[in-house]
Amino acid sequence: MPMTLEATEPKKSKDSSVRDIYLPPERKKVSGGGVPHVSAKNFSIYYGEFEAVKKVSADIMSKYVTAIIGPSGCGKSTFLRSINRMNDLIPNCHTTGALMFDGEDVYGKFTDEVLLRKKIGMVFQKPNPFPKSIFDNIAYGPRLHGIKDRKTLEGIVEKSLRKAALWDEVCDRLDKNALGLSGGQQQRLCVARTLAVEPEILLLDEPTSALDPKATAKIEDLIQELRGSYTIMIVTHNMQQASRVSDYTMFFYEGVLIEHAPTAQLFTRPKDQMTEDYITGRFS
Amino acid sequence: MNLGTRKLLDRSFTALGIGSIVIMGLALLVVLAPIVSKGVGALVFRETIEHRKLLSTEFHRGDGRELEKEIALSNGYRQKAFDMLAVFDQELEQMTPERQEQYRESYDQVKTALRGLLGPLPGDTDPELARNRYGQTRWDKAEEKLRELLYEQKWDYSNPDVIAKPYDVSRAPGFAGTSLVRLFPYVEQNLDKMLLPEWTFYWGFITDSSIDAHFFGGIWPEIQGTLFLAIGAMLFAFPLGVIAAVYFTEYARDGFLTSMLRSANSTLAGVPSIVFGLFGLAFFINTLHVSESKSVLAGSLTLAIMILPTIIRASEEAILSVPKTYKEASLGLGSTKWNTIMTVILPAALPGILTGGVISLGRAAGETAPIIFTAAVSVGTAIGLGDVLSSPTPALSWNIYNLASEHEAAAQIRHVQYGMVLALVTVVLLLNLSAVILRARISKKLKG
Amino acid sequence: MQNSNGMIDDGASKQGRSSVFIVSARKRKLQKISQKSGEATLFLIASFVAIIVLFIFWFVARDAVPFFDSLHTFREFFTSSEWYPADDPPRFGALAIIYGSLMITVGSALIAVPMGILASICLSDILPFNVRQYVKPVIEMLAAIPSVAYGFFALVVFAPLLQNSGGPILMWAWWLIATPFLLLMVIVASELLTTSIAKGAMKKTAHLGLILILGALALLLLYFVGNHLQGLMIMSGTNALNVSIILSFMALPTIVSVSEDALQAVGRDLREGSYALGATRAETIIKTVLPAASSGILAAVILGIMRALGETMVVWMASGNSSHIPDPWFNYLESVRTLTATIAGDMGEADQVTGSARFHVLFAMGLILLIVSFVSNLISERIVVRQRKVLSGQ
């Protein structure tokens, strides 16, 4: 049982931890979920001097879907990318405060970011398959982590593609270039590729912003499928999407976490005036 | 200004721009047309029986029995001309010394021209140089020689304001009244029977080595030398350049040091090629002593330094053009940075890197100045692969210069020079063409 | 990765369970070290280029310095044009050689710069995309042809042509180039003059009269200059004009591609702004696009000129290699000699006596070339950086 941040840090801001999950009737409770999986404590991200994310404290519940919303430039993507340390790619980016994953410090001195990223998979705004075959795309991760046996790889590829609901569409052309797939298929391929390394958390950075409505619906269905097996965080511009797919929602504004609550609660009875203004469309 | 004039100016401006592009295209045509048309003449030409004799004795090629039949045939016609010379020799002996003197000079010229056409005359000692052992091997050259036999060239100095102009005077009237006068029409009419010209495709121009300082034979030693030098340069420069490009694109942080390195790169790209030659001489040969004197190794190293900036730039561009998302995806899957570079970025950038490499290969093959002091010799046979560390080599680029500017009989072997230029230009342009094709395939592949 | 035996490793074992991504201090250290050393290796290889540049300066300068051991040789080198390196005592006056380099550089720039800029404008603003696709390979081929092939062409094809029928060639070139220009100038000048001198009803007649007068003047100019050119006697086809023309075509690809980049960088909105105010394409380009791209174009010109100055084979083969200052100084029909050709040509004889003054003077010439190329490179680099900053609005 992972230790929670609460145990070590008794003082918490009001929104950051949501114990009693408020779920609308159609969303089932997930067995074994609902413990803090990622915990931020006074967590800030700087680009040089600029503080892009300001002292965020929050617990992300395991096996549930957490949506992050907010106007563009509010730091929601930055926050998401900081969880598996993709921000390391940006020069001059540094953090303060604590970010714990399963009780281990993500930004600790002894953190191997490569192992970390294996545990925390990420899917990006634009579908970004490698210019390789579909099979090689999925097998890329497992191969990295030392799996060479063809049979094992085939098993992983099929399992991942099935999980991503793509198997039926591509099973007869696994050796074709992945760039020949449609945008929606490419994005599901990226999800499958991420699942193939068996992560615990899936970070989705506006995964449907480059897709048409039909492909978007499929991705949303997929998120529902994966809910309960993975802790999922999704950044989205689309508030309907957030309310459709997520169990919890975080609202960021100018780098500050304004409100973090069960989705149904946040969209119907927001505690903060700013949240209400945003979700009712007074600003965007 | 009214609108009409403004529009006129606009049109003229457009015309100027298009005009200058058209001029560039024309310039390309004007430069390439003679090189291609005359260069092909080194391979495809009407070879005379002398050429077949040459191939048979020097390279042991051709059908010996057939050749003997031809020789017998041509000798029949030649003999008649030689007989005329013999008759005139007798006539000459019976003349007074003054008359002998009158014919002497002109007669010698006739004999020289005849030697040039048909090879050694009866009674000549066996010549030392290969160029004197055979007559004209090419029909087009034979026709020129025939002119020399029939006409004497004189210069017109009558107008002091203009540069003297040459004009031809027929030789036959000079021998009026002697038996030799019959020689001229006889040779003119029967030259084709003496030389038996036929069209040929002389592959050997590419694969044979040269005979007697390129009077005959092919250019294989030069081609081989060029290949050695260019490939040697790539062996050094390509890995270095790609690794440096990886550093610049993936690791270098913006700062003073990086900007210094980048400046150094563009400085190196701007150094005049002759200075590379000086540096190669002063550093590789006189300081490091990589070899006693000029060698393929020293030349390759010098060329490698010259093409390094091009390779670095092309590789940098290729790496930068790989979508950033590939890198993110790979790192997101838990790949290390080095692994990402090796398995995702470099494979995706490979066509672009190769394009730069291929263009640099062409540049290394075509450059002359850096190898003058470091690797090139004017005459020489093809060297073995084992000698590259210590021996200099002939190379296409240098030998084009050498044959065109410093060869003792540059005007007589124009066809060889054109052939060499064509070979060099073909190699370089083919390399560039393959680069263009590669580039076209990149965009296709990236689009899926 | 997993410290199953519960080793005490700072953060890792606090929870008393196998860790997911926290690794032992030793392992982390090893990782860091291998990372750093890998990066250092890469850095060393990348800095190889800088080391080479330093070495080039050092080794060329090392062999050049002994030549300038006394003020006398230094002064002679730059002020005298007596180049008799084989005499005893040798004379090393390189003024004529430096002048020759300058002359062919200026000559080729005079041809290549206007043509190159016009061609790059044409490529970036005038030609439609599908035509551009065919023009680019032409430019690339011009750049790819080896210099020795250009030299061979200059020596074997162009020089005899120039020597035998240089006069008529120059005359036709003059007529073809100057006629449209003069025609245009007559039309524009007459219109401008009309608006400034005549008013109302007089306008039409004044315009017609001006066209006639200026047209006649232009015709006279065309005729007399053409006549003069035709009568020119060209002693040798291997001269500064020949080399300048060939070099200009070798410098063109550099100028065109670099200045096209500069023009492309200007962006569409600037052009659209100008078109929206009713400017023609030529006016848009000249008044709006060119000024914005001017520094990039300047950099292109510098790079192109350096290509001409540093070129060896063409000048060696086709400049005539005579070390004297032409008379009059702008006479492009005379043979000249350049720094590059002198280095290439004299090293053969100087080579045997490495260390002689004759050997060192060639390195001195190399050093001059090196310094000039270094400085101009630096300048063009600064210019490009500055333009990028201006365009990105910093």
Image (cartoon, rainbow, N blue to C red):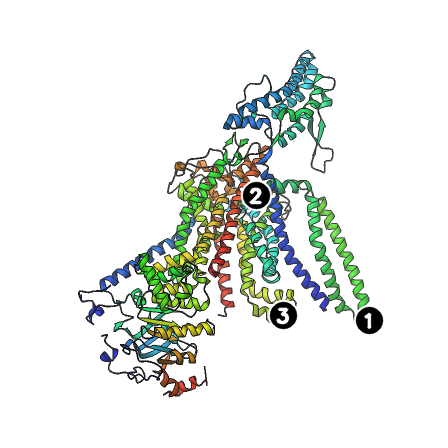
- Quarter assignment of residue C240: top right
Is the C-beta separation of discs 2 and 3 under 8 Å? no
Local packing at callout 3 (Cα closer than 10 Å; few below 14, some 14-19, many 20+) is some
Q: CA distance from mark 1 to mark 2?
A: 61 Å
What is the number of the mark on residue C151? 2
Pointers 1 and 3 within a single chain: yes
The one nearer the camera, C215 or C326, is C215
Q: Nearer the viewer, mark 1 or mark 3?
A: 3
**Element on which disc 2 rests:** helix
Q: Nearer the viewer, mark 1 or mark 2?
A: 2
Whole-percent x, y for residue A208 in the image: 43, 73
Q: CA distance from mark 2 to mark 3?
A: 45 Å
What is the number of the mark on residue B368? none
Q: What residue is disc 3 on?
A: C275
**Element on which disc 3 rests:** helix
> What residue type is disc 2 on?
Gly
